[in-house]
């Protein structure tokens, strides 16, 4: 099963929790995610499965979009609502003018210190492990860019915002630093990731929806197996229900599937190695009943042009050989497909119209 699936992560689960649940639901061992979300946060969590886990290298610097709430009045040790207060709570009545003025200081390219409870490493040890042991955590500021930081609402001691940021930006740190600027303390109360790279909430499904569809697939397989088992068939190969009945005009029923579509913190993609437990006949091993949950391969990496290769070119690419693609002489990297859905490679132009398969995704 080679696919990209967007999960609307619920609060209370880690990104690894989501990956593990998806592995059990899909019976697919090779699954990774494209950027961690804190347990408190919700929203877009892209999962890559099978051979497409290798696409993670192209998403390490993906930009993200968030919506959330900052609460003013006290700071916490984690910079969010799950931490312990580090300052005495104080009553706060915010004014829109002062919030807008402070927010303006965080727009653009800034130096930001990551939270002590983060995946940033100190001499090879994640900072959050040291923080949990109550050891001193000293992290150096890093350069990030907040391309959009829009104040949506100011209500007494809370501020709702929307932000579009580059990879490595911590909205927890933004909340903490704004509280320090106003000398009243603040922390991130809620966070929802609405987009990662080309993936948005419109592409997302819940784990419950995925599990329901997978159960429907299992039931369909079981029904098919029972219908074709020797016990269920007569001597002439017909099932008891249809023996002696003309079924030439009948078509098999397919399970109906009703779908409703539906932060962070930015960290590198995480992959869980392994091999698929089963293969399907469809390209990439994707069962048809689950196909609606997966992002169409043509929509992946929209910055790369696509080309559909003929059989001889596909064979050369799968063997790792250079190919000539005269219609794409100006592209640096391209997506190569066999048919409409089977993404077989990411190729890099090496000279003129000659491309070398940098990443072969199907053999």
Image (cartoon, rainbow, N blue to C red):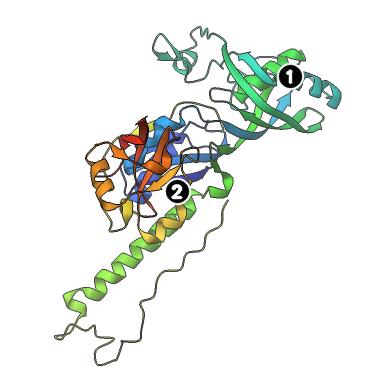
Q: Is residue 88 visible?
A: no
Which circle marks residue 326 in the picture? none
Q: Can residue 175 be seen in this view?
A: yes
* Left or right of residue 266: residue 239: left
Q: Residue at x 29, y 39 (%)?
A: 323
Answer with the quarter of the image where residue 32 lies: top left
Q: Which of 312 and 253 is in front in this view?
A: 312
- Report the residue marked by disc 1: 89
Q: Where is residue 270 in the image (x, y as percent from the top left)?
A: 40, 31
Q: Nearer the viewer, residue 209 or 248?
A: 248
Q: Are the residues flagged by discs 2 and 1 in contact, CB closer than 8 Å? A: no
Q: Where is residue 326 in the image (x, y as percent from the top left)?
A: 38, 42
User: Does 126 appear above or below 41?
Assistant: above
Marks 2 and 1, how far apart at CA: 51 Å
- Report the residue marked by disc 2: 298
Q: Which residue is drawn at 46% across and 28% down?
A: 60
Q: Is mark 2 on a helix, strand or loop?
A: helix
């Amino acid at each position: 099963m080679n696919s990209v699936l967007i999960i609307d992560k619920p609060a209370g689960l880690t990104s690894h929790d989501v990956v593990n649940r998806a592995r059990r639901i899909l019976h697919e061992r090779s699954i990774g995610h494209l950027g961690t979300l804190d347990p408190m946060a919700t929203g877009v969590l892209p999962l890559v499965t099978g051979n497409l886990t290798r696409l993670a290298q192209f998403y390490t610097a993906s930009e993200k979009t968030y919506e959330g709430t900052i609460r003013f009045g006290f700071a916490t040790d984690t910079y969010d609502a799950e931490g312990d207060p580090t300052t005495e709570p104080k009553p706060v009545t915010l004014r829109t003018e002062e919030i807008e003025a402070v927010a303006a200081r965080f727009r653009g390219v800034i130096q930001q210190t990551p939270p002590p409870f983060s995946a940033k490493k100190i001499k090879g040890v994640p900072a959050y492990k040291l923080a949990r042991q109550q050891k001193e955590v000293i992290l150096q500021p890093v350069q990030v860019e907040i391309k959009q930081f829009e104040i949506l609402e100011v209500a007494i001691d809370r501020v709702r915002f929307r932000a579009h940021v580059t990879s490595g930006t911590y909205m927890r740190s933004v909340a903490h630093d704004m509280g320090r600027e106003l000398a009243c303390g603040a922390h991130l109360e809620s966070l929802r990731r609405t987009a990662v790279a080309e993936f948005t909430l419109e592409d997302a499904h819940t784990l419950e929806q995925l599990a329901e569809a997978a159960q429907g697939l299992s039931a369909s397989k079981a029904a098919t197996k029972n219908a074709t088992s020797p016990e269920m068939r007569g001597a002439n190969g017909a099932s008891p229900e249809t023996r002696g009945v003309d079924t030439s005009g009948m078509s098999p029923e397919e399970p109906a599937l009703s779908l409703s579509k539906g932060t962070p913190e930015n960290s590198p993609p995480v992959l869980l190695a392994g091999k698929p437990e089963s293969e399907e006949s469809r390209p990439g091993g994707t069962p048809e009943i689950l196909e609606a949950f997966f992002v169409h391969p043509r929509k992946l990496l929209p910055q790369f042009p696509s080309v559909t290769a003929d059989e001889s070119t596909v064979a050369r690419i799968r063997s790792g050989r250079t190919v000539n693609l005269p219609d794409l002489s100006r592209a640096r990297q391209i997506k190569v497909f066999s048919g409409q859905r089977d993404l077989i490679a990411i190729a890099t132009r090496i000279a003129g119209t000659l491309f070398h398969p940098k990443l072969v995704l199907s053999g």
